[in-house]
Amino acid sequence: MARNKDLNQKIKDERREQILSQALMLYAKKGLSATKITDISSALGISQGLIYHYYKSKEEIFVELIGIAFDRINGACRWLESQPLSPKEKIEFAIRELLKLLEQDENAARYHLLIAQATATEAIPDEAKDIIKKENTFPYEAIARIMAEGQKDGSIKEYDAKELALVFWTSINGLAIYKAVHGEKFKAPAANILTSMFFKE
Amino acid sequence: MARNKDLNQKIKDERREQILSQALMLYAKKGLSATKITDISSALGISQGLIYHYYKSKEEIFVELIGIAFDRINGACRWLESQPLSPKEKIEFAIRELLKLLEQDENAARYHLLIAQATATEAIPDEAKDIIKKENTFPYEAIARIMAEGQKDGSIKEYDAKELALVFWTSINGLAIYKAVHGEKFKAPAANILTSMFFKE
DNA sequence: GTCTATATCCAGATAGAC
DNA sequence: GTCTATCTGGATATAGAC
């Protein structure tokens, strides 16, 4: 009895996983409103009605994905700040890791694109807007803090730290979008090109 | 008689202008598929059916806008290349102008976003995809050519010129998207932050 | 040129059978 | 848990009057 229950739960969890994963791919590729429920279901080889067994709507799926995306990026920022590295090393590490991720981890680029999309459009659920409003500033502020520290120790250029953080993230986002478009063919640029915006000499 | 004809033509031209302009704003804000014909018509205070007097579909409007967007950007690139400036001056000029445009010209940012969107999604008409395929490489190649020249005269860093061009445009695009989101509040970063990626010392 | 119907279609969502 | 069938709504597109 408990066995069946566990098994069912496992099937259910796996289905939710599949739906999320497939929806992420499609949303990143076509956007929320251009993605149909049937796109998701047929890609998974299941019926359209079954999706509604797991999610109330495609918007609900979207909101969950946005939540995951910010958990990932904000978690990574928190982790980065806590590392025993100099500010310059932190920025360098972040850029190298982000570029590597873009090149190697398909989902990473997709999550980035999802956030970029979500922030760039009004055509998303209010709940998603709330999450963005609440979470989106964190990565900018985290990087700005590191930049400011680096200015104190003389390793980072003396521009407004917020501007540096802005350029940091918009550059990464621009690359993420490019990657999402060109997919396989994308080769990340040398990390030093980007780091030279921030480091003295 | 000819008077009436002229006047009618003028009204017609103006309506097309209005529709294009409004559609650009909405597409940039919500994307093609989330924008309804009624969004455009009601923003202009005209009936929904009237749009079809001027355009066959919202896709047709989109295709025309994409064409205009590439005319602008590619025309600007051609113009830039033809100027009597050193490679370094060209890059510097381009970045300053692009940042100024993003900050001041609402439509400029929208056209950029439109291209970014259009290249980043599969949910657009085939005709638009054809235009992108044909036109999108030009700005990258133009900037790559200028970078390569600058490497010959020793003013530009010795990375792969294509990588430099990639970073150039993806950084601008990232900023354009940020601007499109944050609108009024956007203040462009110092141009020197960006130029320092490309210039020696 | 413009508007008000109206027809058509398709995606979202539900209900009930297995 | 999954499917098929069905309902519903909204958006596209057309037709005809002014």
Image (cartoon, coloured by chain):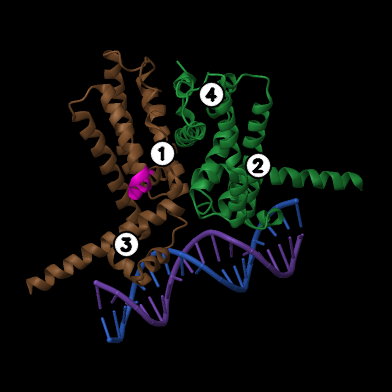
Chain colours: A green, B brown, C purple, D blue
Magenta range is: B103-112
- Residue A167 seen by the camera: yes
Crowding at dot 3, Cα within 10 Å, few <14 / some 14-19 / many 20+, comes out as few
The residue where tag 4 is placed is: A151
Secondary structure at numbered mark 4: helix
Q: Is residue C10 left or right of residue B156?
A: right
SS for dot 2: helix
Residues at marks 4 and 2, CA–CA distance in whole angstroms: 32 Å
| Other-residue count near label 2 (Cα within 10 Å), few / some / many at <14 / 14–19 / ≥20 | few
Q: Which residue lies furthest to the right in this view?
A: A1
**Residue named by callout 3:** B56
In the rendered image, residue B117 lying in the magenta stretch gets the answer no
- The quarter of the picture where the N terminus of chain B appears is bottom left
Question: What residue is pinned by disc 1?
Answer: B188
Three-letter code for the amino acid on which mark 4 is drawn: Gln
- Label 1 marks a residue whose chain is B
Q: CA–CA distance between discs 2 and 1?
A: 30 Å
Q: Type of residue at label 3? A: Lys
Subunit that carries the residue with mark 4: A
Q: Residue furthest front?
A: A152
Instruction: Please say if A19 is above or below B165.
Output: below
Type of amino acid at the residue the image marks with label 2? Ile
Chain containing the residue with disc 3? B
Q: For the residues marked 2 and 3, what is the alpha-carbon distance in whole angstroms? A: 40 Å
Please tell me which of labels 4 and 2 falls first in the chain.
Answer: 2
Q: How crowded is mark 1: few (under 14 residues within 10 Å), some or many (20 or more)?
A: many
Q: Is residue D8 above or below residue A31?
A: below
